[in-house]
């Protein structure tokens, strides 16, 4: 078959031609689209001094030009940011102030990159998490008063989410995908290396897209924005919803819950599930099975969030991943015996303020690191057998006794009263004053770094980080669950307020009212709020996730405490201040897309704050 102008029709044989029958339409090259094999792509990656182009600068640009599956050029330059590079960025990327001092400034570097990239009519830009890199480049162009060429942009992270399942790769970070597709270059947070790795990821994605009939640039651009047949057919589920906060529940043909979510605007949120903005494969699968949608209107968004948590814990919908097993959270506690020890347990049952506990932790590994941090400072025993008078007769001390890390109560070298001092130190560190643990480990890390034993120092950082997070979470949870009654108000508009009642860490009721009738609203809310009884457990009335949701709500700017019974307070020397530093630096690492590699450096900031 030959290609002919589109004004003609193609016919399969002379007989049909004689009858003048048109059996099909033959497109031109313009109608077909821009073939991927004939398109020039420039894969670009940046290193920067921070996560936002509004207050950060570019330190390196790397790019690889490809066409027809072949590399036809590479570009790399350091960039002088004209400001000091933060220490944690230097740790992450290896780029120092000395390396960029003689490098071109952004104006010169940007011009060189644009010259390498070529015209937007010929070139398509590719980046992994493109909004980050392209956002910085556009900001640099604006700063240099240079018009930004209107390049077409492909985001490999976004396309990968449509072709790589979570069973194949846990996430779509560059390092994960590079390993999955067998990239020849390992991404190491240097611009050119990361760009080379992105090239291999892009080619791996294209190999998979071939089975979907993606052969042109237009196919590729629309692939991640496609709407499935199920989305089109199920749009009726979003009809008739109110513009109010609430919880929505997708149900299958037997009315079993498939997915439970919460939102400030039920109408807009549910509609989004049936648009091209929804790209999650598991949600597409859920919509295919959905036949019904129920919703619960709530007066406030905080009540919607809490109802969602409770419903997920109760119904266990198959497509929800978060909050399904709140009762299986991992905690650390001090055991109840003559010579107590530290153990990690699932669930809060059996935890006691009298004995000592902290958590929850993000898994057994983090709990184990927190326990090891305590071992570094105290001489609480690390063995597991129960110690009795009979066991002492046949026991022998372990190596920890010779290392002076244990008093050997297992052989009677330490009495119950003497050993209790170690237990008291541990309990105080968990509940009230963490400075003993923080200062001791900081000092030890300093010594190891001076001796250039960096791997050991890094392991200590990880242990301290886990200890800080777990004890800080426990102290925050404990502070609210000990309050019998609390009423708080949050302004939602100049004349409108939200009011909530919290009792022993459980949301007992919520309402909205104006500044004119707030007294009536509060009185009505007090009368209708749930009655909550303290049962003596560490979480008297709810799961830990509900308590933490309420704590975040109470941290909003503008929150007002209307009434409180009891005391709501945090320990002055607890882990809260150290954790705030960890979370601030973690936000920066998330915005830079370097969360997993950054984990070994952000603890350092927290350690400085405790000195």
Image (cartoon, grey):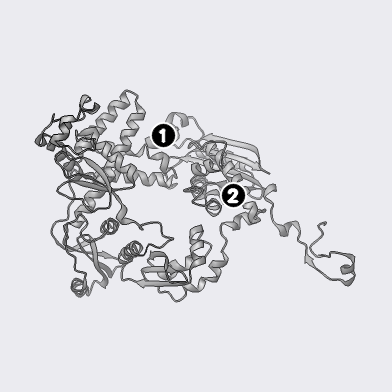
Distance Cα–Cα, label 1 vs label 2: 31 Å
43 relative to 481 in the view: left or right: right
- Pick the front one: 332 or 3: 332
Residue 342, image x and y in percent?
23, 41
Q: Secondary structure at mark 1?
A: helix
- Residue 108 or residue 64, whichever sits in front: 64
Name the residue located 50 percent from the left edge and 32 percent from the top edge: 103
Q: Is residue 182 visible?
A: yes
Q: From the top left corner, tell me how far across and down residue 14 is, in percent.
A: 90, 65
Q: How many marks?
A: 2
In the rendered image, which quarter contains the N terminus?
bottom right
Position in image of residue 146 (x %, y %) = 55, 46
Q: Residues within 10 Å of mark 1 (few under 14, many from 20)?
A: few
Point out the tag, 1 or 2, that comes first from the N-terminus.
1
The quarter holding residue 318 reads bottom left
Q: Which mark is residue 90?
A: 1
């Amino acid at each position: 078959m030959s290609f002919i102008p589109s004004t003609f029709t193609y016919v399969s044989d002379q007989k049909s031609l004689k009858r003048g029958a048109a059996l099909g339409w033959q497109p031109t090259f313009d109608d077909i689209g821009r073939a991927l094999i004939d398109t020039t792509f420039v894969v670009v990656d940046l290193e920067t001094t921070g996560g936002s182009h509004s207050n950060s600068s570019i330190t390196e640009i790397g790019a690889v030009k490809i066409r027809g599956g072949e590399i036809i050029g590479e570009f790399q330059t350091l960039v002088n940011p004209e400001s000091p590079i933060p220490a944690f960025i230097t740790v992450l990327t290896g780029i120092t102030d000395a390396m960029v001092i003689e490098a071109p400034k952004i104006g010169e570097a940007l011009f060189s990159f644009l010259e390498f990239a070529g015209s937007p009519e010929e070139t398509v830009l590719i980046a992994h998490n493109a909004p980050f890199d392209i956002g910085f480049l556009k900001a640099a162009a604006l700063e240099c008063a240079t018009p930004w060429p209107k390049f077409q942009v492909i985001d490999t992270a976004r396309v990968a989410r449509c072709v790589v399942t979570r069973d194949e790769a846990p996430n779509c970070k560059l390092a994960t995908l590079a390993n999955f597709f067998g990239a020849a270059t390992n991404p190491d947070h240097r611009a050119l290396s990361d760009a080379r790795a992105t090239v291999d990821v892009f080619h791996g994605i294209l190999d998979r897209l071939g089975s979907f009939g993606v052969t042109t640039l237009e196919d590729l651009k629309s692939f991640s924005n496609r709407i499935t047949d199920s989305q089109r057919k199920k749009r009726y589920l979003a009809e008739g919803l109110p513009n109010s906060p609430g919880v929505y529940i997708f149900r299958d043909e037997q009315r079993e819950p498939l997915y439970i979510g919460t939102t400030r605007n039920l109408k807009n949120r549910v509609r989004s599930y049936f648009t091209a903005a929804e790209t999650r494969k598991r949600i597409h699968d859920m919509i295919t099975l959905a036949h019904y949608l129920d919703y619960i209107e709530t007066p406030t968004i905080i009540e919607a969030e809490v109802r969602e948590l409770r419903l997920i814990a109760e119904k266990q919908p198959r497509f929800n991943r978060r909050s399904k097993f709140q009762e299986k959270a991992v905690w650390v506690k001090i055991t109840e015996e003559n010579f107590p020890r530290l153990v990690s347990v699932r669930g809060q049952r059996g935890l006691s303020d009298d004995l000592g506990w902290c958590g929850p932790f993000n898994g057994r590994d983090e709990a184990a690191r927190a326990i090891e941090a305590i071992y570094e400072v105290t001489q609480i025993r690390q063995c597991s057998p129960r110690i009795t008078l009979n066991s002492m007769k046949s026991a022998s001390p372990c190596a920890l006794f010779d290392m002076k890390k244990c008093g050997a109560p297992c052989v009677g070298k330490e009495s119950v009263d003497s050993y209790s001092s170690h237990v008291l130190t541990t309990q105080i560190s968990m509940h009230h004053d963490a400075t003993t643990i923080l200062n001791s480990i900081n000092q030890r890390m300093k010594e190891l770094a001076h001796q250039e034993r960096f791997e050991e120092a890094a392991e200590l950082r990880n242990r301290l980080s886990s200890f800080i997070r777990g004890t800080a979470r426990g102290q925050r949870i404990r502070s609210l669950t000990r309050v019998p009654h609390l009423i708080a108000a949050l302004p939602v508009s100049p004349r409108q307020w939200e009011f909530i009642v919290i009792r022993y860490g459980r949301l007992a009721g919520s309402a909205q009212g104006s500044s004119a009738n707030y007294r009536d609203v509060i009185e009505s809310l007090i009368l209708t709020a749930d009655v909550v009884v303290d049962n003596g457990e560490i979480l008297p009335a709810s799961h830990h996730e509900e308590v933490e949701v309420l704590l975040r709500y109470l941290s909003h700017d503008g929150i007002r405490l209307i009434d409180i019974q009891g005391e709501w307070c945090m320990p002055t020397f607890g882990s809260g201040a150290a954790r705030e530093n960890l979370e601030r630096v973690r936000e920066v690492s998330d915005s830079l897309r370097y969360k997993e590699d950054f984990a070994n450096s952000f603890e350092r900031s927290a350690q400085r704050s405790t000195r």
